[in-house]
Amino acid sequence: MNTSSENTTITEIQNCIDTIHSVEANAWIYGTIVAFGIYCATLIVGIGHLRIVITQLARKKPLDIRQWFLSVYVAVAFLLSSLAIAGSIQRTSELLSAKCDVRFILQFGHDDSQASLTETGGLMVTVSFVLTSWAADGIMIWRFLAICHDLKVVKWPIFMLSLLLQMGSMVLGAFVLLGLGGSDTGDDIDFTNIYLIIIEAIALSQNIVLTTLIVGRLLLFRYRTQKALGGNHGNEYISVTTMLVESQSLLGVGQAALVGTGIRGKYGNIMYQVVGQLQVLAPIVLIYRVLQGKTYVS
């Protein structure tokens, strides 16, 4: 019995050391650093949005329904971004402080409290990831309807397809949030990660279709404007910045990378956190430019 107990303790200690120094753990730490940088950028844009709102209210110009909705969206999205970065930092702090304390295991046995802390940090990131994915998709659909409003033959079929994809994403996301995604241990299939990848694959496919139509509509506008007025008229709607913001291209690149790497692994641990933050930053930057009147349709 003593030999068995000692062997179990040695195995637990080795597992702890492997966890602390594993490539995946180091990748999670690097991902947290990058995600925190994106979070800081989100904070700066959020402050700019708040300044626009305060300035308008100071001039005694009440916000209309759309402005109120967008302001609430920015506030909620920022809170979810904060939740995600808090979870990332919590898990990172555990890894940096050697979350499996060898001395604790030697004295008391398996360290269940530390494991629960890790699960809490991961849960915070996952909840934010799912909710912000839905929100970013919603903003993308809104911009598609606003920019392609006169393309009725294309607009409604694509809109219905987007709604169906969104419903599928919400069903899978609900499974994840309700804890129906399976287990992360043993040889069981990890359905949670599978569902998250499918959600991002849906978002990516939707992003590609809507981005193509949005960019095509802007190019068509530029062509017609220059044909009618000549010169450089319409160039403000086809600048690199405008195209990237309107189509949320940066988010699309991140989603493609995440789908390619998966949730786990060296690069997956990085991209999972990065995409979670981009799902907040990209829509907020778009909303900021909309409120500034620097987009094709405000």
Image: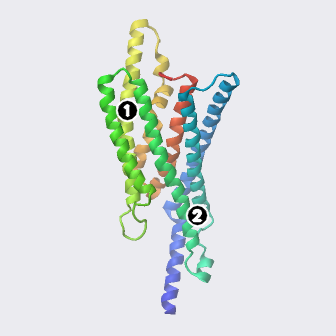
Name the colour scheme: rainbow
Tell me the residue that label 1 is attached to.
210
Q: Is residue 64 left or right of residue 202?
A: right
The foreground one among 206 and 265 is 206
Tell me the residue that label 2 is attached to.
95
Name the quadrant containing residue 45: top right
Q: Vertically, is 179 above or below 79?
A: below
Give, as a three-letter code, the residue at label 2.
Leu
Q: Is residue 119 left or right of residue 57?
A: left
Name the residue rendered at 35%, 46% in the picture.
168
In space, the residues marked 1 and 2 are separated at their CA atoms by 40 Å
Name the residue rendered at 62%, 60% in the picture.
93
Q: Secondary structure at mark 1?
A: helix
The foreground one among 124 and 64 is 64
Q: Position of residue 113 (x, y in %)?
A: 58, 71
Q: Secondary structure at mark 2?
A: helix
Q: Is residue 40 left or right of residue 282?
A: right
Give, as a three-letter code, the residue at label 1.
Leu
Q: Nearer the viewer, mark 1 or mark 2?
A: 1
Q: Position of residue 52 (x, y in %)?
A: 64, 28
Q: Position of residue 76 (x, y in %)?
A: 56, 42
